Image (tube, helix red, strand yellow):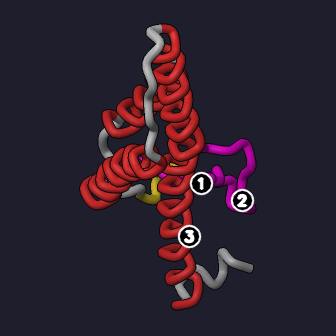
Amino acid sequence: SVYQKRKKDAIQFAQIDFLSILLVGSFLVGLGSSLELVPLIIKVAAINRMMEAARNLRRVTIKRENLYTAVGVIGGCLVIYLSTWSALDPPRQVSEYSLTDSTTDDDEHIVSKMYYCSGGDSDAWQFAAVAWNAVLLL
């Protein structure tokens, strides 16, 4: 079982890989949700600009490069933010202990130890990410 082999190198290295997968997963979720909404918002803003120009009987030219540049700049800012977050406050493995009702043959209570991934020391990073998504959704 994994518990019996927990000191082996393969299990120890797998824990590092698991944390890496969690880090990449949170990175992709943050970037993916933004890259889903940002192009849509930029496109709607361009359509609004066209409609306003049409209302004033003016011709407007929207360059595709400008739309891509806006998405690229916002995406670049997100990559910088997520990289900074990952470097300064990476996820950590945290253990949680709980006393069970089970006992051993010697009438000693068994303590259960569970591991989970904590988002780091500060919740400010997560609050900022949620605030960014709220801004995109409004």
Amino acid type of the residue tagged 1 in the rendering: Met
Residue 34 vs 10, above or below: the answer is above
Residue 8 in view, yes or no: yes
Bounds of the magenta segment: 97-120
Asked whether the residues under the numbered discs 3 and 2 touch, taking CB atoms below 8 Å apart as contact, a structural biologist would say no
Residue at position x 58%, y 35% in the image = 40
Is residue 42 found inside the magenta-colored segment of the image? Answer: no
For the residue pair 61 and 17, the one nearer the viewer reads as 61
- Nearer the observer: mark 2 or 1; the answer is 1
- Nearer the observer: mark 3 or 2; the answer is 3
Residue 59 vs 23, above or below: the answer is above
| Tag 3 secondary structure | helix
Amino acid type of the residue tagged 3 in the rendering: Phe
| Numbered mark located on residue 18 in the image | 3
Residue at position x 45%, y 38% in the image = 62
| Mark 2 / mark 1, whichever is N-terminal | 2
Q: Measured from the top left, where is residue 80 in percent x and y?
A: 30, 54
Amino acid type of the residue tagged 2 in the rendering: Thr
| Mark 3 / mark 1, whichever is N-terminal | 3
Residue 134 vs 18, above or below: the answer is above
Residue at position x 54%, y 56% in the image = 28
The Cα atoms of the two marked residues, 3 and 1, are separated by: 15 Å
Is residue 109 found inside the magenta-colored segment of the image? Answer: yes
Please identify the quadrant where the N terminus is shown: bottom right
Residue at position x 35%, y 35% in the image = 123
| Residue at the extreme top of the image, as rendered | 55
Kindly identify which residue carries mark 2: 104
Q: Main secondary structure of the magenta part?
A: strand
Kindly identify which residue carries mark 1: 114
Q: Measured from the top left, where is residue 17 in percent x and y?
A: 53, 76
Residue 82 in view, yes or no: no
Q: Residues within 10 Å of mark 1 (few under 14, many from 20)?
A: few
